[in-house]
Image (spheres, helix red, strand yellow):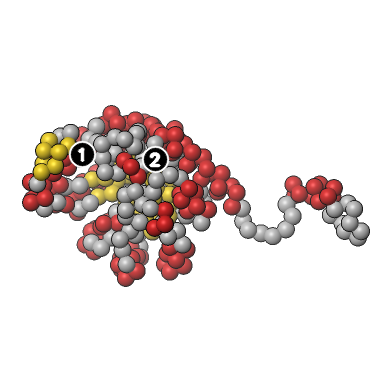
Amino acid sequence: MSIFIIAEIGINHNGDIGIAKKLIDVAKIAGADAVKFQKRTIDLVYKKEMLDSPRESPWGTTQREQKEGLEFGLDEFKEIDSYCKEKGIEWFASAWDMESQKFLRQFNCNYNKVASALLVYEDFLREVASEKKHTFISTGMSSADEIDLAVQIFKEADCPFELMHCVSTYPMADEDANLSCIRTLRDRYKCDVGYSGHESGLAISYAAAALGVSSLERHITLDRAMYGSDQAASVEPAGLMMLTGAVRKIEKAMGDGSLGMIEKEAAVARSLRAHIPGVKS
C-alpha cells in the first residue's frame, strides 16, 4: 500500500484564499495525495480573556483580530472545495471544536483528522467516529491510556482509522522525534500508523517512510519567512517536491524482505564466481 502523503496547509494561508490556492497547486504538482486545512470556532476554542489580550499582527492589535484574520469561513471553504475538485486532489480539515466538525460535514470530504490537542476530548472523538469516515488520529502530547481510549472509541463505532505518531513542538528537535514509537503504536494497537512531522528538514520524514508508515503529513508553505507560528516547521515547494519524490523511491526500495538472489544478479554471479571450484551460479 502506497504511503498517503498529506500536505498540511493548516493556517499557513494567512487568511488569504489566493495563497491557499497556490499551496493547493504546490501540493498537486508535487504529487501529494491530499491537502489539509484547519477549522476553529474562535469563541469555543479560546477564552474571552485570551482573545481580548494584546497581540500585534497584520490584522490588528488583539488576539481576537489575529485569530479571526487567520480563519476561513463558509465562502472560502466552498472555494477550496471547488478548486480541489477542479485540480483533482483530495482535501479535508482538522476541526478544533464540535461546531467546526459539524460545519465541515457539508462538504462530504472523504477523510477526518483528529489533531493531537483533541485526542483527549471524548465527546468530540465520538462525534467524529459517528461519521464512519477514515480518520487520521495524531498522538502528540498523549499518554498510552489516552490513546487506548481513543482507539477504543473508534473501534466501538466501527469507524476506520489510523494513528499518526506526532511530537507537538514547533519546530520539533531531531532528538525528540522518537520514531521508534511508530513500531510501538503498530504493535500495541494492531493498526496502520502514519507520521505527522513538525521538524525542520526532510531526513526524519524519510526515516519514517522507511519504517513503513501508512501516511505522512507535513506542513507546507510558500516561504518559511512568512508570518505565522507554523511556517518555521513547514516545507517550502522545492522541499515538498523532494519529499514526495524520495518517499516514492523509498517505497520501491523497501521490497518484500525475502532472501535470495534476484534475477538481475544471476549474470553477475556467474561472472564473479566463475573462478570458484564447484560453485554453480
Q: Amino acid at mark 1?
A: Leu
Choose between 125 and 143: the one closer to the eye: 143
Q: Image point 47% across, 42% down: which residue?
A: 243
Mark 1 surroundings: few (<14), some (14-19) or many (≥20) residues within 10 A: many
**Position in image of residue 113 (x %, y %):** 32, 52
Q: Amino acid at mark 2?
A: Val
Disc with the residue nearer the chain's start (2 vs 1): 1
Q: Nearer the viewer, mark 2 or mark 1?
A: 2
Residue carrying label 1:
70
Please state if 105 lies on the left or on the right of 243 as rendered: left
The location of residue 133, given as percent across then percent down, is 34, 53
Q: Residue 124 lies in what quarter of the image? A: bottom left
* Badge number at residue 235: 2
Q: In the picture shown, does residue 208 fall above or below 185? A: above
* Residue 53 seen in this snapshot: yes
Label 2 neighbour load within 10 Å: few <14, some 14-19, many 20+: many
Closer to the camera in the image, 95 or 102: 95
In terms of secondary structure, where does tag 1 sit? Answer: helix
> The residue tagged with tag 2: helix, strand or loop?
loop
User: In the shown orientation, is residue 253 left or right of residue 28?
Assistant: right
